[in-house]
Amino acid sequence: MKDNQLLIFSNELKSVSETFINKFIAGLFITGLLLANCYYTWSLAIYAGGCLVLIYAVARNYLDEIIQHYLLSAISAMFMIQFTYQMHGLPEMHYFAFFASTILITFRNWKLQVPLAIVITFHHLLFYYLQLREGNSIYFANARPANEGMLLLDICLSLAVFSLCGFWSYYFNLSIKKQLQQRFEIGMLQEDQHQKKMMISMSESLRASNKKLKTTLDELANIFNTIDEVLFSVDMKTNKLLHISPACEKIYGYPPSFFMTYSNLWQSVIHPSDKQRVNDNYKRLVDGRTVIDQYRIIKKDKTIGWVEAKVIPTFDRNGNFIRKDGIIKDISERKLAEETLRESSAKRIISERLMKTAEKLAKFGSWQLDVSTSAVNWSDGAFQLYGYAAGEIQASYELFLEHVHPEDVDKVKEILQHAWEHLHFQKSNFRIIDRNGKLKYIQAEFILERDESEQVKTITGFKQDITEKTLLENKLAKEILHKQKAITDAAVSAQEEERSFMGEELHDNINPILATVKLYLDCAVSDEKRRLELIGDARGYVTTAMNEIRNLSKSVLPPSLGEVGLINSLNDLVANIENVHKLAFETHWENVHENELCNKLQLTVYRIVQEQINNVLKHSGASKVKIKLHQHGERLQLSLLDDGSGFDSSIRRQGVGIQNIIHRAELFNGKVEIISHPGKGCELKVDFINKEILAINQLAQAG
């Protein structure tokens, strides 16, 4: 323990020292850059100083810690030599070596002074040699004259400083170890004393706890022996009763010794009708659940009693069911009272439940006012209408008016006043705002009971929440209005498209033909020689114009389906389109009985086919369309499938053509389904329910 603490403290000091020496090395490099400005020795400051910093960085990352420290000592001396040569032999630069020697004391290793002393001594000798060889006039402008005495003095002083720093490193290391040892010993003594105090305190606490435990056990034993409920524990491994309280004799009629001796006595006292349910509780105990159950028992005197048992399972670390503990209470008197109460109030409870259920389901509430006593009674449903729990607040006429919508208060007061003065019965609809700020629509009825003098005795009221009904009616009215508007818009748009189409046909097709006829007739008037020929050509153009007008009429006016028939009309439509467009058709008419389809339904089918083909020609670029019409009973199914460009059917389409198809289908309870994907064509499915066929089938079934 002591060695570990010494090691931790030593590592902390090393970390601080290394952080400081890092800053010191960086400071030496920066000092070299600053000194370079004096004699313009930038190359020496950058290259020599940079190499020393690089060597130190490599040593920090790749060399052993001891080698790092020795190399650090030498690098500090080399920086001093660099500064000396940068300052042209200025002897005061040796102070930097003394600074480094002082900093190395923090590592508490006197041997780190040795590399510093060797490098500095070597430098003094080399410096002395260079002075003797080159003289003062060559480089060392700031150096003292070479002198053996001064050389010896510098070396001795440097060694003395390094030796003194080494001594302090050694002494510092010993002092720290000694102080840590003393602190550790003091700490151990303090810890021993603290543990002794803790042991004494724990001993006293344990003595007090034992005393309290003994008192508690005595109290529990007293409770165990005097309690009216049966307390018991059973060892599930041996299925033996561990203990049972004396109350068992009072409840079962058997003393504890009987239960301890006869292990099956538990099962024998359970009423036969309840044994299976009690045995089923064992599975719940094995699952780790607490069991609470009520069942009948047969006492020693053969009378039947009721008990309530609560059993708690106990498991070992491996999850094995090892013991069960429980408490059994005699509830015979309570059961008897409950049964008596249940029989006496069964009708009333059923009636109240039915009333409350009816009020809840119908959102219905009732109230009554006794005029003589001014007592007001609200049913649970009446409270709920206003957002209150039953009986949460005092019912009153003022509370009722507080919740009536401000715009309906005067109307409600006027109705009540009129009924009070003249009527025996009154109905009214008004709005209320419940306690949560929710608006509700109420339908109310008032029954006024009068005495012989026609004075009101009691008022009975019934209120029903018709908010959902009212909102649905309003919503339905809006939807019908919106739908009618949409149908009108679609019809107007369709009319405008038909008019535009007719105008374009008359202007671009028929009008030029008639203009040509006029030109030919004008020429016939002025040219006697070619008059007959020109009149004959004009007649041909008139015939062409008549045919174009006939075709235009067919495309605009509904065909006479009653005369031609739906299938023939569809075939004519397909044939006419194939004559003028490069669009092939494939038709399938399956089991279609036109005599069972009313004219309006046939016309609707024809118009839907016409509209969808128009959409195909305008938008899809298809080359083929497959039309299928199938009748099955009262259902008529129409399908148009093209091989065009298709579209994303999940995006709602707002085109007039699609809207026309949907609205036409809805007139005959038809459902429209559009299946399409980009590049995969489009299929339009319309499923009709033919009302006339349905009525005929129902009539046939009734007959």
Image (cartoon, rainbow, N blue to C red):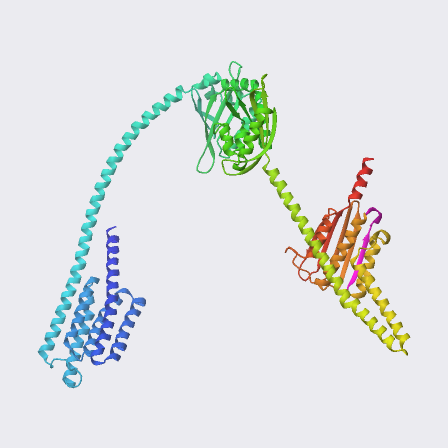
Tell me if residue 627 comes above or below residue 474 in the rendering. Answer: below
The answer to whether residue 629 is magenta is no
Rendering coords of residue 174 (x, y %): 17, 57
Q: Which residues are magenta?
A: 582-597
485 and 5: which is toward the camera: 485
Q: Quadrant of residue 677?
A: bottom right
Q: Quadrant of residue 159?
A: bottom left
Q: State the residue lying farthest toward the left.
A: 149
Tell me if residue 212 comes above or below residue 154 in the rendering. Answer: above
* Residue 475 in sight: yes
Rendering coords of residue 668 (x, y %): 75, 47
The answer to whether residue 584 is magenta is yes
Rendering coords of residue 229 (x, y %): 44, 21
Instruction: Name the side, left or right, on which 237 lies relative to 492.
Output: left
Rendering coords of residue 238 (x, y %): 47, 28
Tell me if residue 636 comes above or below residue 420 in the rendering. Answer: below
